[in-house]
Image (cartoon, coloured by chain):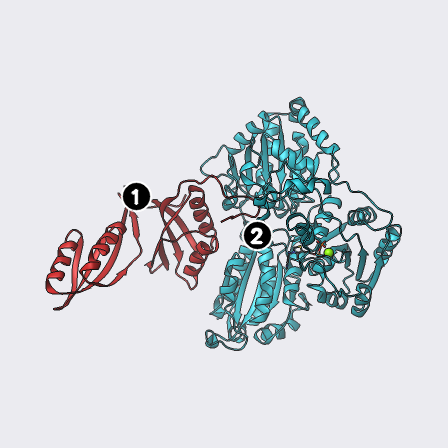
Amino acid sequence: MIKSAYSFATQKEKIKQHIIVVWVDNETGVLARVVGLFSGRGYNIDSLAVAEVDKKKNISRITIATSGTPQVLQQIKLQLGKLVPVHKVADFPSNKKTLMREMALLKIVASKTQLEKAKNLCKKYKYIILDKTEKSFVFEISALKKEIDDLIKKLQPLGLASASRTGVVAMTKGSEIYQQD
Amino acid sequence: MANLFTGAEIVFKVLEDHGVEHIFGYPGGAVLPIYDELKNHTKIKHILVRHEQGAGHAAEGYARSSGKPGVLLVTSGPGATNAVTALTDAYMDSIPLVCITGQVPTHLIGTDAFQECDTTGITRPCTKHNWLVKDVNKLSSILNKAFEVATTGRPGPVLVDIPKDIQFKKGKYIKFKEVKKNENKSNITFNGIDNSIEQAIELIKKSSKPIFYTGGGVINSGPKATELLRELVSLTGFPITSTLQGLGAFPGDDNQFLGMLGMHGTYEANNAMHDCDLMINIGARFDDRITGKIDEFSPKSKKIHIDIDPSSINKNVSVDLAIVGDVKFVLKKLISSIKEKYPNFADSNKQGISSWWKQIELWRKKNSLGFSNSKEVIKPQYAVQRLYELTKAQDTFITTEVGQHQMWAAQHYKFNKPNRWMTSGGLGTMGYGLPAAIGVQVANPDKLVIDIAGEASVLMTMQEMSTAVQYKLPIKIFILNNEYMGMVRQWQELLHDKNYSESYTAALPDFVKLAEAYGCVGIRANKPDELDKKISEMLASNKPVIFDCVVDKTENCYPMIPSGKPHNQMLLGKQDEDDKISEEGKVLV
Ligand SMILES: Cc1ncc(C[n+]2csc(CCOP(=O)(O)OP(=O)(O)O)c2C)c(N)n1
Ligand SMILES: [Mg+2]
């Protein structure tokens, strides 16, 4: 696709995965503003997690997994920073300094032996059985995105009937917290 | 217990607090309480337009020519959607607007009520911010914030959507208190580089082929920025070029000025941009009409970018040094640092850039704005030149529509002051110029205001002539009438084998009679030798005038950087056309 009016897109820069964390006023429309900025400017959203984190100050934390060239990632941050309800924007690189987790609820409907097999597969991760019947299990798994992707793939032939996943949430390691500069 | 006021009263109290004297608007069911309140506020004059898009463009013209935010007031539903083009236009060109819309009563929101639309949803991508007011007690603080957001940082439009019940409800009004801004703390660093001014000066000192590339940001920063720019340019002796929006920040007739750059910029400006070794971008945004083919854009230069908006930096073109801040503060610092470090900079530096100037003079000799004049038909370029010559003695304000005439106006009308040139650059909105001229005339009652128009564009908002007549606004609509959507025709000639698909307007109105129907003056010029006399007649009239200037129908606008080409491969005229545009170039806009 030709992006800008009379230039060609050339010089493909490397696309990188990033996690952008945005602290916003928890008010109506704020998520639409953030998401609208991404769709309007053609940025990717790989996953999204939002919830209020400070009731007193009325602040929500939005965690967006995205990908783009370094130039695009910088644009994303700067454009987000211009939105009025945005307090700060952080960029968590997907590397060893960042803790990342996704959660999934997985329902297996299958025979007893299949259910046992499924359970064994889940054992590799942090899991809880939230609900159990003769014919079904509901697992809660908390792991990295890729791990959940893998698990789902393996559970499919074992009777995975329903999967519900959160977007990734992230935090820096150590005692530091993110300060806007 | 503080006094309570209705929402409608609060709206006017806040407008008064911000010194608003004019609002452009159109009434309707969802704003009637506000319109009812108008009678109690004689300091605020309401200008009734004929279409809400007109209100928006008029407010833009008002803002651009006065430096104050423009205010518009429209009803819910169609009133709001009609304003969207103007809001987007203001967003693209960084014009401060405050748009107040009525909304259906709070309890009806979401029910598909009569004239309900999701105004904040629709305008979210074309405003800096917008608000739906759900509590009358918050109305004054929201409106204050709206003015602040519109006018600070990179300016732009904002919208406040007020449901009808909130307009009736009584609530607290908090008087606006201006917060004194600390001007020196304008945050002029970027990416932690705090010696950026020193770095800039070193680049300036070292350069032997420098150029200033300036944009609308200089104008938006205010008259002080313009003065400082002039000082910096004469201090350095460097050549300067300007974007479409920056015209007037530097005198158009000064020898250091190379004219406008970009798609229809001059040969010398574009070649200097291409060959320079130092580009100093002040308040411009490397937009695609400027850069041409991006990866062949000024390949050998170091680039400095001064901009108030950090997201403008490295958006389209990577730069070597970014200075984020208000132009006037950055220029002030730059100038004082140069003077301190290199007193006599211009003299000591003359030698270093003399061969660069020689090269520029060679490019200038091409006379790229030249055209072959005619005794039979009026050439559009000639018409703009005559208009300039006959109006340059007065303080004249020019607006335009969009098309060839717009480019000819930019090329041949010379601006010496900021805020005298109002054109839709970013969005390229046909129909902008006439209502914008109305706004300009409202802000500058005794000045000469001319819309250099195309016959196709001007018909898009022609109804606003009625507004001009009602308020006795003597705007002059100077139509370069070529019967074609000339710019479309030009592209079809160059790129689509002269298949002039739907770019001819049959059944154009008789503009002279149309003027008479509106109650203003109509004048027509057919021949070059009657042009001066007719223009003088137009200028002598104290009424709004529609001037039908019948021009050559097939004239093209040159020079031109064709699609997909870099700056140093311009078309200078018809003879260049055939071999220059590749198949790839044809798919670009
Ligand atoms: C609202 C809108 N619709 C369509 C266009 C595309 N467009 C750009 S220039 C142009 C032709 C303008 O014709 P005219 O006003 O007669 O000006 P000329 O080029 O002939 O000087 C058109 C259709 C536009 N810029 N704006
Ligand atoms: Mg035309």
Kind of residue at disc 1: Glu
**Vertical order, B55 against B218 (above or below):** below
Q: Is residue B436 left or right of residue B383?
A: left
Q: Nearer the viewer, mark 2 or mark 1?
A: 2
Q: Chain of mark 1?
A: A
Q: Quadrant of residue B582?
A: top right
- Label 1 residue SS: loop
- Relative image position of residue A180 (x, y in whole percent): 40, 45
Q: Is residue B414 among the parts visible in the rendering?
A: no
Q: What residue is shown with label 2?
A: B155
**Vertical order, B425 against B164 (above or below):** above
Label of residue A176 in the image:
1
Chain B image colour: cyan
Label of residue B109 in the image:
none
**Vertical order, B199 against A79 (above or below):** above
Mark 1 Cβ and ligand 1 under 8 Å apart: no
**Callout 1 crowding tier (Cα within 10 Å): few <14, some 14–19, many ≥20:** few
Name the one closer to the observer, B517 or B293: B293
Q: Which chain is red?
A: A
Kind of residue at disc 2: Pro
Name the one closer to the observer, A89 or B12: A89
- Relative image position of residue A76 (x, y in whole percent): 44, 48
